Amino acid sequence: MPRFIRWCSIICLLLSVVPFAQAQSTYPDRPVRFVVAFPPGGATDTFFRQISNELSTALGQTIVIENKGGAGGYVGWQYVASSPPDGYTVLVAENALGINQALYKKHSSGFDPLKDYDAVAAMGSTPLVWTVANNVPANNFKEFVAWSKTVPAKFNYGHAGPGSVSHLAAEVIIDGAGMQAVPVPFKGGGPAAAAVAGGHVAANVSSLPVAKGQVEGKLVKGLAVTSDKRSPSMPDIPTLRSDLGVKTADVALEFWWGLFVPKGTPEPIKAKLQKAIQDTMANPAVRERLLKVDTDPSFAPGPALKTKLENEIKNWSVFIDAKGIKVEQ
């Protein structure tokens, strides 16, 4: 009898493994959801929509982009982390994932991107632009710094939520320029960019593709770009460090993007996603489209993305701790 039970157990195990293996081999056989943890109109949403058609072709399946904004990205991040590890719920993340962890590391939320996700592939990066509202009486960065010191109650700047790229990058720029400001959180980069365009906040840090549209539409003024060299697509805007001489903390002032899946996603599924991203970022149409807005269409495999995230957490922790930046901001 024990032998019979043992054989039954083995057969049941084999029967359960076969469909699982078949599912991996046929992946993806239904639409794949790609979750952006911020509302439409922000840097990550804008970037991913620029490559989504070609990625859908490379993956051989329909792509559904789902915006789950809130809590500085945490709502969307947690949603993906708690999803089944079957490759059908994928996180489109930016370096806010690491910055946020650096800011919240002393809080017992239980969330840890290094433990809750498997890194799939890095997808690209772009500089940031310091933009200001048209009703601010400053037409260049030096004038803005001088104006900021005349504001009795400090000027305010919008950002995509505590721990977002636009939040901490702004703090680095403000610190480097010797200014003081009050942060105003929004539910994402899109709403924050709209707020500065509407004159509701004085300044904002946007990704270059988002800022380019606003500046060219004369909705805002672009006063500084964070790249080492001037942007080919916005050559009139000076660089923060080289042209303006602003000395900033040793952190990467840029947006970079990567794909993550829930921890435990099978290797064959991650390999298919990684290959699809690699093919997409090598697509001439994608490269031309991204390079026009100074977005580097670079690809890197999962292990390199994981290392990038680890370094982001470490480097931003140094700045956050040194400046005593609190979660409440």
Image: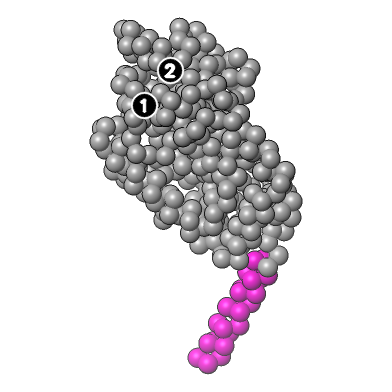
One can see residue 66 in this view: no
In the image shown, does 141 or 132 lie closer to the viewer?
Answer: 141
In the image shown, does 264 or 319 lie closer to the viewer?
Answer: 319
Amino acid on which the number 2 mark rests in the picture: Phe
Residue 168 in the image: state x and y as whole percent: 39, 32
Count of numbered tags: 2
The label shown at residue 78 is none
Residue name at image x 34 percent, y 47 percent:
314
The label shown at residue 141 is 2
Residue 117 in the image: state x and y as whole percent: 48, 54
- Assess whether residue 201 is covered by the magenta stretch: no
Query: Cβ–Cβ below 8 Å for labels 2 and 1?
Result: yes
157, above or below 270, in the image:
above
What predominant SS class does the magenta segment belong to? Answer: helix
Residue 154 in the image: state x and y as whole percent: 33, 13
Give the quadrant of residue 306.
bottom left
Magenta segment: 1-24
Residue 275 in the image: state x and y as whole percent: 64, 58
Q: How far apart are marks 2 and 1 (CA)?
A: 10 Å
Judging by the rendered image, the residue that carries numbered circle 1 is 246
One can see residue 141 in this view: yes
SS at mark 1 in the image: loop
**Label 2 neighbourhood size at 10 Å, few (<14), some (14-19), many (20+)?**
many
SS at mark 2 in the image: helix
**Label 1 neighbourhood size at 10 Å, few (<14), some (14-19), many (20+)?**
some
Residue name at image x 54 percent, y 13 percent:
198
